[in-house]
Image (spheres, rainbow, N blue to C red):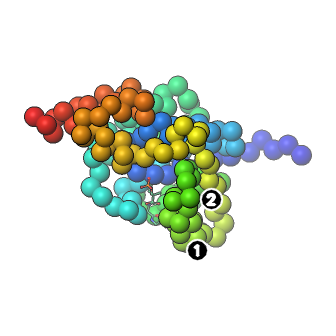
Amino acid sequence: MTSSRIVTALYPGSFDPVTLGHEDIARRTLTVADRVVVGVARTATQAKKPAFSMDDRLAMLEEVFADEDRIECTAFEGLLVDFAREIGADVVVRGLRAVSDFEYEFQMAQMNRELHPGMEFIFLTPDAHLSFLSASLVREVAALGGDVSPFVSPPVLRRLRERFQKQEE
Ligand code: PNS
């Protein structure tokens, strides 16, 4: 049986900033969904003061996915499950890099399922060469003057340089 229904996946996160690991997961999601909404949460569970404003995080995402009209980027307020309902998401996608991610992801998925029993969560693994990558490590290396060009796309690299050069001045 074939279906013409559009499958929408929500890929939520902080994206502070978007790394090649995030890009890999978003593009991989297109192998199982027709449309991916990259949702930048205003309230993150492991809340820290973000290095980049919401506008900057969205601008970077829009630039890195400018070549792919099946990927949309937007900010959201409040609960992930409410936003998922609002956009008619069929599934929520998260990246799973290593066993160390599992506990946090499992806890969030179980809580989200309590809040929205109909929502499904799928976990995709990035390419092996990206499996050690995190936005927090990229921020730290960039802030200390290290080369992060292998880990982020050019628009992100430019903003990281601007952000951390400004801090040094
Ligand atoms: O990239 P992150 O910071 O690991 O992403 C975490 C995120 C944004 C997916 C999570 O904090 C989230 O869903 N925030 C929205 C608020 C919410 O629904 N909190 C309850 C989660 S069980």
Q: How many marks?
A: 2
Front-most of 140 and 104? Answer: 140
In the image, what residue type sits under mark 2?
Phe
Which residue occupies 63% across, 63% down?
A: 119
Gap in Å between the C-alphas at discs 1 and 2? 12 Å
Residue at x-position 52% and y-position 25%: 67
Q: In the image, what residue occupies the spot 47% across and 49% down?
A: 39
Tell me which corner region of the image, top left, top right, bottom left or bottom right, holds residue 63: top left
Residue 135 falls in which quadrant of the image?
Answer: top left
Res 160 label: none
Q: Is residue 167 above or below residue 69?
A: below
Specify the farthest residue to the right.
1
Residue at 67% across, 43% down: 33
Query: Measured from the top left, where is residue 104 in percent x and y?
Result: 50, 64
Whether residue 88 is visible here, answered yes or no, is: no
Label 1 Cα crowd, 10 Å radius (few <14 / some 14-19 / many 20+): few
Q: Nearer the viewer, residue 154 or 36?
A: 154
User: Which is nearer the eye, 112 or 48?
Assistant: 48
Q: Is residue 34 above or below residue 124?
A: above
70 lies left or right of 156: right
- Whether the residue under disc 2 has CB within 8 Å of ligand 1: no
Secondary structure of the residue carrying numbered label 1? helix
Q: Position of residue 141 (x, y in %)?
A: 31, 40
Q: Tag 2's secondary structure?
A: strand
The amino acid sitting under disc 1 is: Glu
Labels 1 and 2: the sequence-earlier one: 1
Q: Which residue is mark 1?
A: 114
* Quarter occupied by the C terminus: top left
Q: Which residue is mark 2?
A: 121
41 relative position to 80: left or right? left
19 or 11: nearer the viewer:
19
Residue 137 appears in view: yes
